Amino acid sequence: MWSNLKLFSTVLLFANVPFQVAGHMGGMFLPMHCNLGLDEVPCVSFSSRNFNLSETVEISCGVCVEMDIAGELYLEQGIDVQGKLIFPASRQALQITTPYVFVQGKLIIEQLLDKMIPQPDKELTFNFVGSDSVIFTSHHNQTFAKCNGGCNLSKKPFVVAGGSLDIQGMHDDCHTWSRLLSVNDAGSPVMNEIETPTARSGCSDFLADESFDDAAAIEGIWDGFGASTTVLNGYISVTGRTSGYHAPRVYLPFECITPSASYLVKLRYRYRHSSGTETLFGAPYLQLVRGKVAGGSDWVRADYVNGRAPVSQVPIDEWHDYETIIRFSDEMANASETTSLSLYLAPYSDVDTIDLEHFELKLAPASAFEGRSCDSLLVNGNLDLFDHTYPFYQGDGVLTVVEDASIAPPGATSFFQSKFRTSKYYSFFSQNIAEECLVKASIYTFSAYARVDSPVARVVSFSLEAGTTTSSIATCPPSADNSWVHCTGNILLTEEHAGAVSAHIATRIHDDDYSNVDVAEVSFSYHGGRVTQLTLEDASGVSDCWGNGAEVLITSHTIQHESAQVATIESVDTIGIITLQEPIYRPITLEDDPQTGVEVALLTRNIIFKAAEDDNESPLDGGHVIIMHTTAPVIQNIVGVESHGFGQQGRLGRYPMHFHMCGSVDGSVVSKLAVRNTKQRGIVVHGTNDLYLDENILHNTRGHAMMLEDGGETGNTFERNLGAVGHGVEIRISDAESDTNPSTFWITNPDNTWIGNVAAGAAFSGFWFEVTSRVRGPSQALHPDMIPNALALRHFSDNVSHSNSQGLQTYPQTGYRPEVLAVFRNHRSYRNRLSGVFFHAGGRLSMDGAYLSDNKIGVDIDVDHSDVISNSVIIGSSNVYQNFVESVGAAAYQWPEVALCEAENTLVGVRLDSFHDGHLFGATGTSLRNVTFSGFGPTSCPGSTVLHVDDSDILYFDTRNSIEEIIVSDDSRKIELCDGEQQVAIRDVDGSFFGEPGFIISDTNAIFAHPDCNSIASSCAAFCPGVCLRSLTVAVPSYYDRGALTLEVSGTLPDGRAITPIYVQDFQTKDIKMPLKESSHGRLFVTLPAGGSYNGRFFLNNEPVWPLYTNLQYEDTEGNCGADFASFEIDEFDSAQCSQLVQNGEFETGIDYWWHVGNLGLAHVDGGANGSSKALMAPNAVQDGGGRWVGVGQYLDTRCIEEGYTYTMSAKVKLTNSVTGDLFQCNLSGYSSDEASCPKATLRFVNNVDGVTSWPSVGTMQQNDNEWNTIEGTFVATAENAAAHAAFLYISGAPADVDIAVDAISFTRTIITSPPSALASASPSASPDVSNSPFEASNYESVQFDEESIRLVTDSSQDSTVLTKMAHIGDLDMIVHFQDRFVSDSGYQPQLVLFFAPEAASVDDLTTNDNGFGPYFESTVVAWMRERVYCCMDHTWFTAKANDMDGGVTAYSGSIAQKMAASGSLRLKRTGGSISAYYSFDNGTLWSQIGNDVLLPANNQTAPLKMGFRIKREWKASYDVTTIPIISSDGEVDPGGNTDPRSSFSDDNTEKQSATCEEGGCVLAGPDYNAIVLSKESFTGDVTLIVKVKNREMFGEGYQSGLWLFFAPEDATLASIPANDDDFRNYAVATVGDKIFPSIEHTWTEMSSQDISGRIDQHGGDGWQNTDGYLKLERIGGNLKASMSANGNGWMDIGEEQPLPFPDAPMKVGLRTQRNWAPGYNIEVIPQLIIFEKVGAAYADVTVTDP
């Protein structure tokens, strides 16, 4: 009955409103009744229905249609599948163009019979079009009315609302990706065939070859072109030059010229000049003169074949070699056009004489052309073909060949020489390269020798100039003084090189314009890189599934995500070897490295969703798929779909694949999708649990690729999914989203499973745990108490992250901080630009079995704590990646860089954090165990190191950080601390790092104390063998600047040796946040050998100083590796001026020395007390977080706090309304929790070393009716106070929205008094003899018995109660005389309370702290009375209360202007069934009654009652009073002990999971995540379930497993009770449960109940732990009520009573644990039922009385 009600629990109407605004209100779309039996309905063909395609095509509810259309189908107004639509396996290719698809029934796309992808003749495409928003209106049979009035689903939607998808686009045994095992190289590109030039018939290869030995032989061939010539001594000389063309000229046999062929010129010339003083002249050039048949002549520069070079200056009187090439045009070789052809050597300047010694002009030899291929791009690089520079040429200077083996590099006999250079900007050594060899993905290796004739070391570089693209090939080591250096390098050819119309090698010398340069042994050879064949690691599911034309993704093999490649398959052979249509860049394979081979993924599918690019106004809007509000048992099977262009950027809820607020979808599968080229995000799981996602491929996405959206999603499984090339969005949904920094897996809740997934490259992060402290979005209402960042990690193993900025990270500031260690198992993270693993702002995180390589930082521990790195391998720079970077040459350092060592990047194995104080968050330090390091040595990036410490805040390092079982397997540098880290201390537990156990420390005078420590060369670190270090925090006032104070510490070791004094400062680099907040301090961290005796002194500006207070606290625990310090004393120097401890209490000149309590700051305001001009105010607006904790305070000089002294506090206080500014009048007699509470003054004493903190009250409000009222009081210091390290005086306590202004504050020391501590610390009897006493006590420390009196005494806030052992009958009379009561000088004094209690009450039931006095003590007792006095007033207030006949409480109060101080008498009586109360000031001679008699209820008028008295402490830590109790009655009754009641649950009347029940109670403990006890019978009418907690074991340090009482529908079974906590509370009729935290004295409770609009949650709690208390859940008169009790007597309501929609519906009762992510549970309880009606058979052993 109740289950049916829930289906209709939410009715919401939305008319044309954006769907996402609605959120999830608890409702679900459900299968429609009109589709019942649909699977048995015969199907009709689509074509037979004759649909009007211009209207919405509606597949009606209850109808089955089978698609039989092929080709194209245009659905102008979309399609709404309300019944069933089937695309059969026998379908033909079809493209459906539609603005939308709605599925409210069933959409089935059957699996094709053939596995192959692609199958163009079977391809099914949905082409989504349109730029208008689409309104979805749900079917009138849909019970969930969310979209009855229409929901705006934006444009191009594919919507599932209550329907189901069964899309089978890929066979089960077909895989979507595998790792790459190996590749085959395609070889070098094919060079165009080159024709070898030959001489004309009958002609020689030589056009000229002259050595000028015979003058007659050159007659008619050579002349001086008009100048005089002579031939002598083997050269021709041209003299008497008067023109530029007067030069040696030769007539060429043009009829023998081969046109366009290259002719090689070699000559030797000399200038001589005597007519002037010039000694340098421009080098000559070659000029052709052609005589034309048509008349006239042409003058042509002959050596411009490779461009014109600058004119070099050469010296006179020296012979110079010159080599070049000439090409002749067709007309020059044509006798019909040319009559003559001559060539002359033309100088650029007017030199007197030109001598020509040798001249050779010949056709380039065949060896320059034969056998050419793209295997070698350069010809004649080692001068083994011919002795000419050809085909090299110069762009500057003169290039020649020098044949001299004695000065050539090793193995060479000749070399190229460049002389007479003019500029460093010109290439002096070049050769053209065949453009067809410049093919993408080719890698070429360059090698050469070079030397520079310069006394200064110079660098030569070689580059490739292809069109407008210049790429570096090799940069030589520096060369000087003619020393040869070897130059090597690789170049990777890219799309920028391919297609260039020209290309050549260029060579330059850096920063040198003139030096001669020699080059030898030049080669430029194909190295590989062009891959056309891929062999996969696992070919199963590939050879018969991946086919010709399919596209594949090859993931990035570099640190850049965009290095991923997409290729098209040409063929796949039977063993799975893939041949590609075009070559790709060579990736890294498993044969290269079995850990880091890339992945190959199939991108093509036979079912395609496409979004048309037809929205010009919103081009970032694509299509989107949304399965909304559709929960199990409706199942979605979405397999093998390829989508393009889906998602709508900047729009909430518009994603390529989106499960929206579906609750549990257990059984649903999203598998083998190819989500491509998205506009926003990828696969989004939102408000959805238990979804299985596997083998999905996401490529080229925008924003987060696979994500859990709100943080409430649990139980989902991500297995073998792969994402690559993730980009940021341009437009975010809101500022709260982080999609501009995209991740492949964005994780907001760790309670899910990730196995074998690959994050193969995103612009930001691979796996991003962005878990926060609360669920967000519409899921927040469903999980109000869920704390995602505290949840356990369900399962994370065998995942991979590579080619991201961060491989795996936990971020941002809220951090991931689970209660138990979260273990990331066998994670591989490599080639990430920043960190392989980044743990930030959390703690208790573990990497176990990790493989981390080629990351800038392997593991970065940043503001994190208690992390563990174990059983892992961390490599800085791997050999494989180094080889890759070297293979691609300079391209590795071009944007975007793929080289690890770009920009002087250093690599770090593990970077530890220096941020945390060790005592925060239960931190234990980071531990490295069994970790192997390599790749951080000389061959890695410069400065790399295994360990480093974050230098962002260098204040302190947790001494509990430890390493053990560490292996450094090569010459890696172990540690480097040269970034300023002052106080690093890392424990080498077993000596595996440095050979023996000890501590690694900073080599600074802030920590280098032990004489056995030794510096480690070049590391700024030291090692201390055999040493244990401990750390202590010294907190000082925050008004000191960072580094202003220096603490000098000296002392001795336990063996008597002196330490080296250390000098410690506040080394933090960050400003103090909120420096005026009272909890802000400057911190100095002292790290010293354990067990030593130390003394410190503070210095400010080199002068000794006492910094007001020094609050000390150990940062680690004793026994970590050694004992606490034997002593640690800080010199206080001379005593301060102690008559007035408050500084600047008048505020006239500012607010120096004052701190604020709370987070709202301080204000210096006008108008002080007593006519002064200024005051100090603490703003306290509720909207800013105000409350009673807000106030002002000042740290006092602890030197002035001495035992026995009396201190007087006074201040003026003004209270005003924060909103109106009106004066506020507080209640002087109210409690601190009063809604009009008054502020008071308190001193907080802290001694963290001894673990003592106390808060004595030192001043209270004396009046409340003035503008400025007085707070005053006195206080006597105890020894404990005097030993405190910090004393903070503060004024607080006004309610929220009441600002506190203070002025004229004074705290003075007056006289020494008898110390109260001496009285309060009298030693109690270790085993008090109380056997003869009628009383027992709550404890025997603060309650001390002697023969006649009972002393109640403590100085440690203990609560004391005395109770008769027996109950008494008849008339009762209890008198308590007290004497020797200590009355302090401040505040209300601890009160003496007399009471009568029920017979079953125990002394523990009646012992509460002050907070529990009202809810528990008062509600337990039958009657009570008390007195109350104030320290500083002659007045006593009296109160008496008793239960009365009307079921209420009658209270009387009175007062007298006389102080019942050190002694007095109180009396409580029951006479004739009535209660009366009295007091006496004269030891009982004269009694005064408080009020009148109160007639008790009938059951208490004669019932046995116990008598007792207790202390109500008034929140004071100390009291001391000696009492003499006298009791009388009509007799005693032995209550027979407080035995536990009998349990109403047994094995026979309950079903159980991980629980057992018997007469003594039930035990909830077992292997299941949660235990359940459920009654077999159902009950109507009034039902009360009470559970007493008998024993509750604690597990871990976090929240414990909760105990929940519940009412469930009558058809409930163990199987029907949800495992999910939130689903359980939605399922149950009502629940009440608790939550406790071991270290906090508090129990949090929550009640849930159902009404017609859904679930109502209410919260409660109280200041005790429910380890032995009670919970109660009741249905009385159709209303639900829940309450809690510490003792089973006094009950506190949890929330308000709620009416149930079915007040008498049959229901079952039960118990359940709520795990709260605790590591275990074991709870023993006694459940009892009070019932009035039942359903079915009698309920065995029913308890019918309230226990």
Image: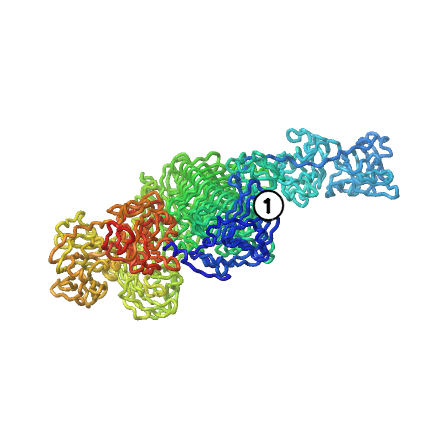
Q: Position of residue 575 (x, y in %)?
A: 56, 33
Relative to 549, residue 1744 above or below? below
Read off the residue under disc 1.
92
Secondary structure found at label 1: loop
User: Along the horizontal axis of the image, is 396 left or right of 1306?
Assistant: right
Q: Using residue 420 as the reference point, say whether residue 1659 is left or right of it.
A: left
Picture mark count: 1
> Would you call the spot at circle 1 few (<14 residues within 10 Å), some (14-19), or many (20 or more)?
some
Q: Nearer the viewer, residue 277 or 853?
A: 853
Is residue 383 positioned above or below 653 on the image? above
Q: As rendered, which of 1021 and 124 lies closer to the eye?
A: 124
What quarter of the picture does the N terminus occupy? bottom left
Q: How was this image coloured?
A: rainbow
- Residue 1270 vs 1061, above or below: the answer is below
Instruction: Give the quarter of the image for residue 1733.
Output: bottom left
Q: Where is residue 1622 shown, x and y percent of the image?
A: 39, 52
Horizontal arrangement in the rendering, residue 585 relative to residue 1676 (left or right): right
The type of residue carrying mark 1 is: Gln
Q: Residue at x 59, y 52 (%)?
A: 97
Q: Nearer the viewer, residue 781 or 1260?
A: 781
Quarter containing the C terminus: bottom left
**Along the horizontal axis of the image, is 598 left or right of 1733?**
right
| Residue 1376 is at least partly visible in this image | no
Whole-percent x, y for residue 1112 in the image: 33, 50
Which of 411 and 295 lies nearest the eye of the viewer?
295
